[in-house]
């Protein structure tokens, strides 16, 4: 349960909260299980705060500091966290449906099992974030930085990943059906067993990517760079490879094209 003193101070307004945090920099606010629906916490210092299972639907958290905060199982549906600091925050199993995380800093955040359907993550920094099993169906990740992120088994069907950075990310067994990856950077990405059926990767950079045993039915690789990519166990019938760079592609255990 939440600490009633902490909750009362927060409800007194931003000025009171800021002053209290400045006077008590080492305290970790406990706001767990609280109803904060539609609250305006723009720019608030919630670093290390315990917001587990909090109701933050439609909350305004623009540019708020939530670094290392506990938001496990919190409901942030349709909340505005644009430009928020969520470095190393924990959002395990959080409800983030249609949340605005545009240009937010989510480096090394833990989003295992979170529901991000329809979320706006345009330009967000998700470097080394943990997104195993995360539902990102229909989300906007255009220009997002997912360098080294773990997206194993994530659902990215119909997602917008145009110009996104997925260098060395783990997308093994991920669902990218009909995803938009035009111009995306996928250097040495792991796409083993991923579903890329009818995905659009025109002009994408896939140098050294591992696409072994991936589903490439109807995939568009026009003008993509697939140099040194691993395509073992792949059925290339129906794949559009017009203008693609295929130098030294590995198509079997003992052969290089």
Image (cartoon, grey):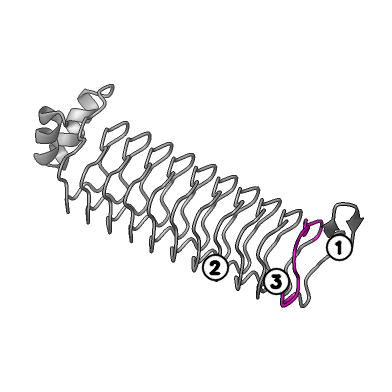
Q: Is residue 173 magenta?
A: no
Q: Quadrant of residue 51?
A: top left
Helix, strand or loop at label 1? It is loop
Q: CA distance from mark 3 to mark 1?
A: 14 Å
Image depth: mark 2 or mark 1 in front: 2
Q: What main secondary structure does the magenta stretch of the protein show?
A: loop
Label 3 vs 1, first from the N-terminus: 3
Q: Nearer the viewer, residue 92 or 44?
A: 92
Circle 3 packing at 10 Å, graded few (<14), some (14-19), many (20+), is many
| SS for dot 2 | loop
Q: Name the mark on residue 221.
A: 3
Which residue lies under the disc numbered 1? 247
Q: Residue at x 50, y 65 (%)?
A: 157
For the residues labelled 2 and 1, say whether their Cβ atoms are less than 8 Å apart.
Answer: no
- Is residue 173 toward the left or the right of residue 3 in the image? right
Give the image quarter of residue 203. bottom right
Mark 2 residue crowding within 10 angstroms, few (<14) / some (14–19) / many (20+): many
> Which mark is first along the chain, 2 or 3?
2
* Mark closest to the chain's N terminus, 2 or 1: 2
Q: Nearer the viewer, residue 128 or 215?
A: 215
User: Compared to 105, does 20 lie above or below?
Assistant: above
Residue hosting label 2: 179
User: Circle 3 sits in a helix, a strand or a loop, which is it?
Assistant: loop
Q: Position of residue 129 (x, y in %)?
A: 50, 43
Vertical position of residue 18 compared to residue 125: above or below: above
Boundaries of the magenta span: 227-240
């Amino acid at each position: 349960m939440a600490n009633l003193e902490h909750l009362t101070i927060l409800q007194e307004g931003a000025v009171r909260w800021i002053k209290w945090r400045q006077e008590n920099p080492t305290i970790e606010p406990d706001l767990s299980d609280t109803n904060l629906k539609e609250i305006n916490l723009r720019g608030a210092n919630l670093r290390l705060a315990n917001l587990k299972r909090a109701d933050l639907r439609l909350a305004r958290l623009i540019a708020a500091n939530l670094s290392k905060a506990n938001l496990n199982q919190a409901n942030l549906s349709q909340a505005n966290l644009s430009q928020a600091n969520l470095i190393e925050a924990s959002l395990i199993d959080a409800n983030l449906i249609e949340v605005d995380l545009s240009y937010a800093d989510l480096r090394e955040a833990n989003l295992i099992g979170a529901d991000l359907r329809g979320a706006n993550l345009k330009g967000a920094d998700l470097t080394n974030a943990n997104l195993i099993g995360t539902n990102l169906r229909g989300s906007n990740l255009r220009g997002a930085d997912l360098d080294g992120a773990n997206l194993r088994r994530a659902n990215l069907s119909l997602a917008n990943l145009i110009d996104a950075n997925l260098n060395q990310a783990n997308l093994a067994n991920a669902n990218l059906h009909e995803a938009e990856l035009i111009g995306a950077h996928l250097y040495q990405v792991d796409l083993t067993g991923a579903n890329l059926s009818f995905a659009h990767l025109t002009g994408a950079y896939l140098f050294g990517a591992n696409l072994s045993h991936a589903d490439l039915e109807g995939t568009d690789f026009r003008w993509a760079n697939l140099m040194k990519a691993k395509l073992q166990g792949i059925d290339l019938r129906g794949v559009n490879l017009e203008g693609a760079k295929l130098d030294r592609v590995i198509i079997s255990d003992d052969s290089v094209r």
